[in-house]
Amino acid sequence: MPGPKDLDPSSSPRAMIGAELRHARERKGLSQSELGEPLFVSGSFIGQLESGTRRMHREYAVQLDEILETGDFFTRHCETSAKSRYPDHFEEAAEAEAVTTAIRNYNPLLIPGLLQTPLYAAELFRTYRPMVSDAEVEELVAIRMQRARLLDDPTKPLFMTVIDEAALRRPVGGPAAMVEILRHVADLMRRRRIIAQVLPFAAGAHAGLGGALKLMEFTDGPPLCFLEGLDTGKLVDDPATVARHALTFTLLQTTALAPTESLALIESVAQDYEHEQPRP
């Protein structure tokens, strides 16, 4: 098994804290599992902290300072790494998403966030938060578009998604917004930047009826699964649970249309929305 990748401590506060944690642990002669025991976390969790995949919470920082005899280093610096532009329930998932090598995503109701376009995202934010100002909506959209730049790289991360037909048929933001986003998804598919499949209504009952899921893989750590609900989210690293949800995604892929058929359906629905737009 290859050794842990050296981090660039200057790349982010989490990378700096992770590099220091690895150094302090090795200085004490502890394995990741041994360090995790008094914190009641797994060795893989410690590895995720060291690799910068996960953010260090204050309760862990206090205990680590005591165990590793680092004064208040981790307690002081974890506050810096905790600053996030994302909601509390999603911030760790967004941070992990930024360093992933592969993403497998299923959403039963919406086009996935990384594939969203400005008109579509703006309509969602206005619906979720009807009292916010236009300026706040613009800021939220800008944050989501910045996050979507993860797909600007031509080769990584590998992005695979199963999109429910309901997400294609629900006119979020009206015909113009739907044309924009469906053409965008189709373009990413044609450029072979993403692998997308549509789960048709005709499939009936399927393995993903329980809700949305996102699976993430990493070069230097075990896979994670993010389960999201209404203003809630849970990042899971338990191997058995992650494996179970990985099977769920595989079952969804086998039930969904093939990528070529999915592309044809997406473009057909986009064309239908185009016909609904008012003529100039």
Image (spheres, helix red, strand yellow):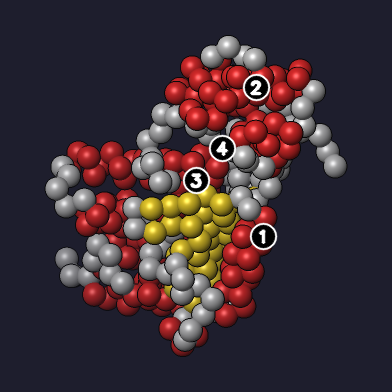
Residue on which the image places disc 4: 54
Q: What residue is shown with label 2?
A: 67
Choose the circle earlier in sequence order: 4 or 1.
4
- The alpha-carbon separation of the residues under discs 4 and 1 comes to 19 Å
- Kind of element beneath mark 4: loop
**Residue name at image x 22 percent, y 57 percent:** 127
- Would residue 159 be visible to someone looking at this image? no
**Residue 197 drawn above or below residue 148:** below
Counting from the top left corner in percent of width and height, residue 277 is at 22, 70
* Residue displayed at 38% across by 41% down: 88
Q: Of the residues under marks 3 and 1, which one precedes in the sequence?
A: 3
Question: Eyeballing the image, is 5 above or below 210?
Answer: above
Q: How far apart in space, not on screen, are marks 3 and 1 (Cα)?
A: 19 Å
Where is mark 3, residue-wise? Answer: 93
- Give amino acid for label 2: Ile
Which numbered disc, 4 or 3, marks the residue that appears first in the sequence?
A: 4
In the rendering, which numbered label is found on residue 21? none
Q: Nearer the viewer, mark 4 or mark 2?
A: 2
Callout 3 crowding tier (Cα within 10 Å): few <14, some 14–19, many ≥20? many
Crowding at dot 1, Cα within 10 Å, few <14 / some 14-19 / many 20+, comes out as few
Q: Which residue is mark 1?
A: 240
Q: Amino acid at mark 3?
A: Ala
Which one is closest to the eye, mark 1 or mark 2?
2
Q: State whether residue 126 is above or below residue 207.
A: above
10 Å crowding of disc 4: few (<14), some (14-19), many (20+): many
Residue 175 rendering spot, x and y as whole percentages? 26, 68
Residue type, label 4: Arg
Q: Is residue 76 visible?
A: yes
